[in-house]
Image (cartoon, rainbow, N blue to C red):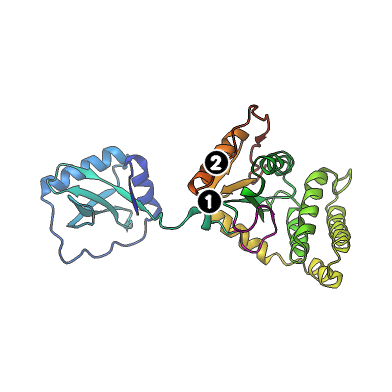
Amino acid sequence: MLTVVKPFRTIVFAFALAALGCHAQPPAASSSTLTPEAARRVEVLIRSKSNVPPEYKIEIGLRSKSDVAGFDAIDVNFSANGKTSKPVTFLLSSDGKTLAQFTRFDISKDPKELVSAANRPARGGAANAPVVIVVFDDLECPFCAKMHAQLFPALTERYKNQVRVVYRDFPLSQHPWAMRAAIDTNCLGTQSPGGYWNLVDYVHLHAGELGGDDKSLAKANETLDTLTRDEGRRQKVDIDALNACLVKQDDTMIRATMKEAEGLGVDSTPALFINGEKLEGAVPLEYVYQMIDGALTAAGQTPPPASTTVPSTSATPAAKPGN
């Protein structure tokens, strides 16, 4: 566990507002009351640092034992219009001279395990590769297509089998055929990982052509299904099973992936997680190398020697909902 100081400012008040309507928990039996003078000092500091509007009443709770040496815990409630916030916990030093707020983060898990790459077609290194890059991808996203064409070939050339690449789906609502593409590629991927990547390569390369000159959604969907069946035949998969999957167009797994991605803070594409470390937006390739090199070093591996030339390629700006 790591303890990090959290600044007051508006963060405290924003948290209190978000929880308005919840009721405070009863204090612990071992609590004691602050003196009026000490409670006044705490209230004045919180109001000044958190920009609390005057109509909000601040109630300073009882002082109780904390697990931070030299500090006791006090719960502070914000109330307005007959509603009371969930308590916000502060720490008060034993001598009553210092007020602090801390947030604890659990770092007991390897960040690499926080973003699942399980049961997905993969490229590059083996399942035990020291670095796994999970990409949340939208097959209709032009930024994803540019990244797909430029970034990962460079990474494969530099890192060889030290890096394993997995794509997961995050089709944006403003891209009409993105969900269809995600479902179709997954229908094929369940039978043929190689076919999955061939299809993803093709769709990203030719995304601008799908739907024809009039950008017909029906035509784009028909083309996606045809491409998937053609690749399935090349890979000698069970065509009947593939056709059944294409006809069903079950988006349950895609929706679950999108929900998981949102829980990880993903709101645009492409979004990369390099051994769990998130990367979005326009980032020069050398910074991506730095992140991968750091992940390799942490895994006890030696990164490749630095290149004498810096590639001009960069991770592209991310596509967000509505763009």
Residue 94 among those drawn in magenta: no
Q: Report the number of discs.
A: 2
Q: Pointer 1: what residue?
A: 276
For the residues labelled 1 and 2, the Cα–Cα distance comes to 14 Å
Q: Residue 310 in the image: x percent, y percent?
A: 64, 28
Q: Quadrant of the C terminus?
A: top right
Q: Nearer the viewer, residue 134 or 64?
A: 134
Label 1: element kind: loop
| Amino acid type, label 1 | Gly
Q: Residue furthest top?
A: 309
Amino acid type shown at disc 2: Asp
Q: Nearer the viewer, mark 1 or mark 2?
A: 2
Other residues around mark 2 within 10 Å, as few (<14) / some (14–19) / many (≥20): many
**Chief SS of the magenta region:** loop
Q: Within 10 angstroms of label 1, few (less than 14), some, or many (20 or more) residues?
A: many
- Describe residue 84's horizontal placement relative to residue 236 as left or right: left
From the top left corner, tell me how far across and down residue 245 is, in percent.
Answer: 79, 69
Give coordinates of residue 96: x percent, y percent: 14, 45
Q: Nearer the viewer, residue 216 or 247?
A: 247
The residue segment tinted magenta is 117-128
Q: Which mark is residue 293?
A: 2
Whether residue 243 can be seen here:
yes
Which residue is drawn at the image coordinates 21% and 41% (left, top)? 44
In the rendered image, the vertical position of residue 85 relative to residue 154, given as above or below: below
Q: Which of pointers 1 and 2 lies earlier in the amino acid sequence?
A: 1
